Amino acid sequence: MTLQVSCVQMHWAGSMEKNLEKTLRYIRAAAQCGSRVVLFPEASITSYYFPYAIGLDPQGVQAALDSTRRAAEEHAVWVIAGTIRKTTDRYLNLAHVIAPDGSIVHEYAKVHMAGRDEKRYCRGGNKLALFEIDGIPCTLIICRDGRHPELYRIPAMAGAQVLFHPSCSSDEIEAVCWKRTSGRAQQPVGPNSKIFHCVANTVGQSPDGKQTSSGASFIREPNGIPLAEAGFYDEEMITAVLDLSRADRSYILDSMRDPPFLRKYWEAMVVDVRSRAHLKPE
């Protein structure tokens, strides 16, 4: 079984109107090249630039998300897009999994906040992501969550073969340079899990010129080998075909078996992840 995936690399501090225009254009482009799934970066609709995002009208944000849903239905593709959504007490950083019929079938709230603005305005979610795309078990994390392997390894214990990873690795210019020279902003997960890893990251500078983003979106197979990679600076879309037979989760299965004294704890956590997967972040 195969799954063709496209990952879109976009500017992280654009207006919602520009972001929506790009979102609709890339959904169309992904469908035209035969992709079944198109993954967008963290907060792709609202932008991750908090001085702008927190001033958006929640109804406008919902309208933009609805337009994205209609595009998914029009082109019959799965779409994973992000918003910063206001709640009664702060904000949630959300990823929305949109089915080819336009319905939102899963939502995940980022668990680990990153950066001063996000820590100031947002709170973390309280579940792990587990959902299916065309019958394929999948999971999802957002940006900094990737530094916490339990967030994707436990869903992989529950069967997930593909990790979708929207990201916005924005930071001071020196920090972004360090991320690039140290390897990548997001480290491949295949070598500790044997699942696919699809990253959609951001590029570009903040309006004040003090921050930038690291780009380098990628799609990697379960041994960590790159199937497609994006550059550091440009908005672009990368695409790859995933051969699901390669995602055997062998390292995950080994972890569940040994050492034996941990087995019952892993099994209990898998039960909890499955029981909470349907909960709507609030």
Image (cartoon, grey):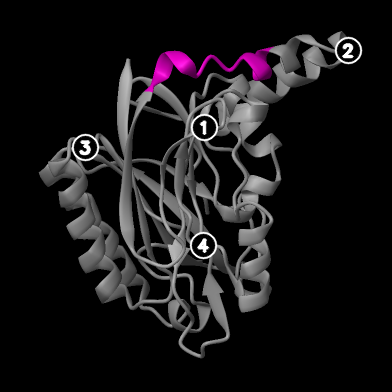
Query: Of circles 4 and 2, which is in front?
Result: 4
Mark 2 to mark 1: distance in Å? 33 Å
Chain-order first, disc 1 or disc 3: 3
Mark 1, residues whose alpha carbon is within 10 Å: few (<14), some, or many (≥20)?
Answer: few
Q: Residue at x 53, y 25 (%)?
A: 222
- Residue at the disc numbered 3: 100
Tell me what residue is drawn at x 53 percent, y 14 percent: 248
Can you tell which of label 2 and label 1 is closer to the viewer? 1
What's the CA distance linking mark 4 and mark 3?
A: 25 Å
Tell me the number on the disc at residue 73: none
Q: Amino acid at mark 3?
A: Pro
Question: Which one is in front, 175 or 120?
Answer: 175
Residue count near mark 3 (Cα–Cα under 10 Å), binned few <14, some 14–19, many ≥20? many
Dot 4 or dot 2: first in sequence order is 4
- Whichever of callouts 4 and 3 sits on the residue coming sooner in the sequence is 3
Q: Amino acid at mark 1?
A: Ile
- Estimate how packed mark 4 is, as few (under 14), some (14 to 19) or many (20 or more) residues with alpha carbons within 10 Å: many
Mark 4–mark 2 distance (CA, rounded to whole Å): 38 Å
Neighbourhood count class around disc 2 (C-alpha, 10 Å): few under 14, some 14–19, many 20 upward: few
Q: In the image, which residues are magenta?
A: 243-253
Q: Which residue is mark 2?
A: 261
Q: From the viewer's perspective, is 282 left or right of 244?
A: right
C-alpha span from label 3 to label 2 = 43 Å
Per the image, the residue denoted by label 1 is: 225
